[in-house]
Amino acid sequence: MKLQSTLQTNLNNPIPVLLSKLWVFLSLNYILCDVLSNMEMAVLKGLLEGNIAGIEMTQGFLLMAGISLEIPFLMVLLSSVLPYKANRITNIAAASLMIVYQLGSFMVGSETTLHYMFFSGVEILGNAVILGLALRWRQLI
């Protein structure tokens, strides 16, 4: 009953709906950036050798990459179902983490490509919008 009430409240409030849509947008950007990166000859060779730009493709690395991609996917759902306070805190935390993660990605590897810089800019801006919305979000009474 509480979840149904929260869902109804969130559907009547444009902020949770907008946050969820922004997370979908970001999820697609993360995926498409990776797809385009995999079209680069150096990345293709690196994938075959198990080392891309000095980063060894270990099980641990791939697990961490999977977890980092799961965050925006999970936020699509959580933005729609969490009650106000938990929703606000979770969006602030996730957007902040993804901004740090994306900025940190420039410190890893040897070469940053034009498409990666473009997508990173879009992703950082998208997360900043989510962060701003969540910080300014006030519960409707």
Image (cartoon, rainbow, N blue to C red):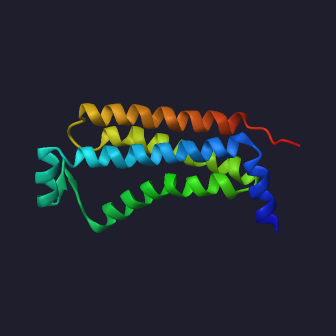
Residue 80 coordinates in the image, percent (x, y) = 66, 54
| Whether residue 55 can be seen here | yes
Residue at far right of view: 141
Quadrant where the image shows the N terminus: bottom right
**Where 22 sits versus 129, above or below?**
below
Q: Nearer the viewer, residue 8 or 58?
A: 8
| Residue at the image point whose x is 25% and y is 44% from the top | 36
Residue 35 coordinates in the image, percent (x, y) = 28, 49
Quadrant where the image shows the C terminus: top right
State how many labels appear.
Answer: 0
**Where 115 sits versus 63, above or below?**
above
| Residue at the image point whose x is 65% and y is 35% from the top | 133
Q: Is residue 74 left or right of residue 9?
A: left
Q: Nearer the viewer, residue 33 or 59?
A: 33
| Residue at the image point whose x is 59% and y is 38% from the top | 130
Q: Is residue 39 left or right of residue 92?
A: left
| Residue at the image point whose x is 49% and y is 32% from the top | 125
Residue 15 coordinates in the image, percent (x, y) = 69, 41
